[in-house]
Amino acid sequence: MTNSSSVYLTGPRDYEFVAKEKKNNNLPKWTESSIKKTQTIKKLVCADGTHLLVWKKPNKLEFYEKDKEKRKYQLPKNERIKDIVSSYETYLILTESGKVWSLANGNRFKEVPLLDADQSTFEEIRPVTFFEEKKLFVNSLAMGYGSCYYLCNGDQLYASGSNSLGRLDLGQYGGKVPMPTYCQDKVIKIFAGINSLNFFFTTSQPDRLYCCGKNIYGELGIGSNNLQKKPTAVKNFKGSEILTVSSSFYHSILITKKGQTFGCGVFIKNGHGDNKYIFTLIPQLKEKKVVQLTTGRDRTLVLTDQNELYVWGFFNYLYPTDELQNDFPNKISLPGFFTKYLGSKDLIRIASGSFVSFLYLDFKNILSQDLRILYESQKFCDCEIGTMGNQIPVHKAIIEFRTKLTIDQIQNKLFVEKSINKEQTLSFLKWIYYDEISDFEKLEQTFNLLELTFPPSVDNTIEKDIAQLYQNDDSKDFKILVKIVDDNQVEENEDNEEKEENYEEISVHKFILYARSGLFRAMFDYVNEKDNTNQVQDYTNKSIKSLEILIKYFYTNSIEMTTEQDPKLIVDELSDAVEYYQLNDQCNFESELNKIKNQFDLN
């Protein structure tokens, strides 16, 4: 890599505080930021002011603000961040334990939904104790301009903050709701926007999408521009069809699970003249599958599954207005740094504040993504867990290293002594394979049955367990044969017979090769499992030392060398590893190689 930063931004001059180079006018197009070590970024959140919050490690955050030093925050060690939402001077942080924390400047924004909002500052993260006192487990958050929404205990909707224009789903108009207040149940998903004065949510019974709040520009998509202070159904959409909705001050964008993009309000002509009051399919994106959406105050950015970026809206802080059309999606070029990742899925991320937009790379869990591929393929599973008729194939080594229990112990505790259902089993396996806590309560029940400490500590990660698995030779079931090259060896003996070739062996777990390398994945998918292939010969002519370092990297995500190894040889032989072995984590691998180059002055 040519640089250590992979965050780019565009917006007003106010955001120079996070730009790598200072400018004398608005930040032109995409400007590289000064944020470092971005391969660890999990989420970047920007509110309305000149500040932003960067979530890097499971319980650690960094805060950037104009004219001030960077601040670092750390939640209690047993808390793992699940999500962050923001609006104006307020950030709300949700942890896996179902608790909510706040980072807010209450002196500048009086509608923070906290009892002591006036005393809140950006100096510290503070717990929102209301939910714990009421024994409410918070599943997800959404936040509009001065209003907050909380999905609790699975399907119960609570709201707090400003209720101007009736946007809190309380059937009222105006006023403030200082503490979270119950609205209704059977809610599945909640949606708002950083500058929105309205709110969307889906329900299970009936299966619908609802909205309420400001509708001056037809941004609710209900066929009129009438204010809605009570929840109103958005026609033509089932709640189960919705991937996400994001609303701004002037318009709203809706993405279905199929990746179709619909819009309504100002800046959304949709090829239908002035008919902006209903959600209409946007023709320029008709053949595209949109997977990410972000809206600012008056603009929209969407990213397709092919990493194509489209933008439309008001461009005074994005691009000169004569370059783009306000009312239609415009495809814009990604910065050069990102072009190498155009073929990589789930790496490029987009984010917006009111006036600033960001691009960054998400390497938070490349190993977890690779193991998700393995989990979903069920390739090379060597045992099962579950009850008769509902057994789920799993990999014994992964299960036992994550839990420090044997498969038999797990089977007895979960399915003999206590028969848990398949849904709870799947929740457990999501944590096992890729650290996802999809259902806190079900996972807690499973941990209790297994007599494991819950919640898992921030140090208890899939990365650490897989790194330890590298040392477990007994469970390795595959060998890579590397030819021993002897410069003094002649190819034929005196009898004109070919000499027997000798090989050194590298032991590895077959499922690790399948998870980490597209090359091995293709090979294993091609070879019939009934052939029981347990070895392969390497034909790359790389040295045994280089291949051993590469295999260890598959487990540890780091390149480690000993003093007797030749660093130049290692760097030269592994320089094409990303492309040849089809690795997902190009950024991290190249970064590791660069460390060796810098350490031994090989640049």
Image (cartoon, rainbow, N blue to C red):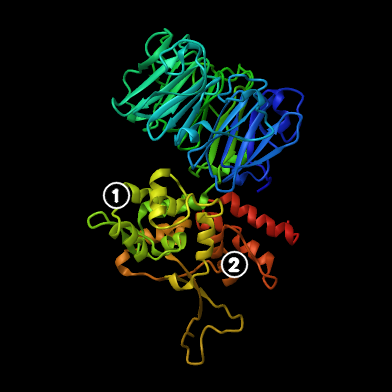
Q: Quadrant of residue 188?
A: top left
- The C terminus lies in quadrant: bottom right
Looking at the picture, tell me which residue is in the foreground, 226 or 3: 226
Q: Is residue 227 above or below residue 461?
A: above
Q: Are marks 1 and 2 in contact (CB under 8 Å)?
A: no
Which is closer to the viewer, label 1 or label 2?
1
- Residue picked out by circle 2: 546
Q: From what the image shows, is residue 77 above or below residue 199?
A: below
Label 2 element class = helix
**In x, y percent, where is residue 138?**
46, 35
Q: Is residue 269 visible?
A: no
- Residue for badge 1: 421
Evaluate whether residue 503 shows in this view.
Answer: yes
Q: Considering depth in this image, is 471 or 317 the residue closer to the camera?
A: 471
State the SS at label 1. loop
Classify residue 496 as left or right of residue 387. right
Q: Amino acid at mark 2?
A: Ser
Q: Position of residue 312 (x, y in %)?
A: 53, 21
Taking the spot 55% from the left edge, 69% from the top edge, the residue there is 541
- Residue 41, given in percent of the width and then of the height, sits at 59, 42
The residue drawn where x is 34% and y is 51% is: 425
Badge 1 density bin: few <14, some 14–19, many ≥20, Cα 10 Å:
few
**Amino acid type, mark 1:** Asn
For marks 1 and 2 on the same chain, the one whose residue lies earlier in the sequence? 1
Seen from the viewer's position, the closer of residues 330 and 515 is 515
User: x, y percentage for residue 71?
Assistant: 70, 37
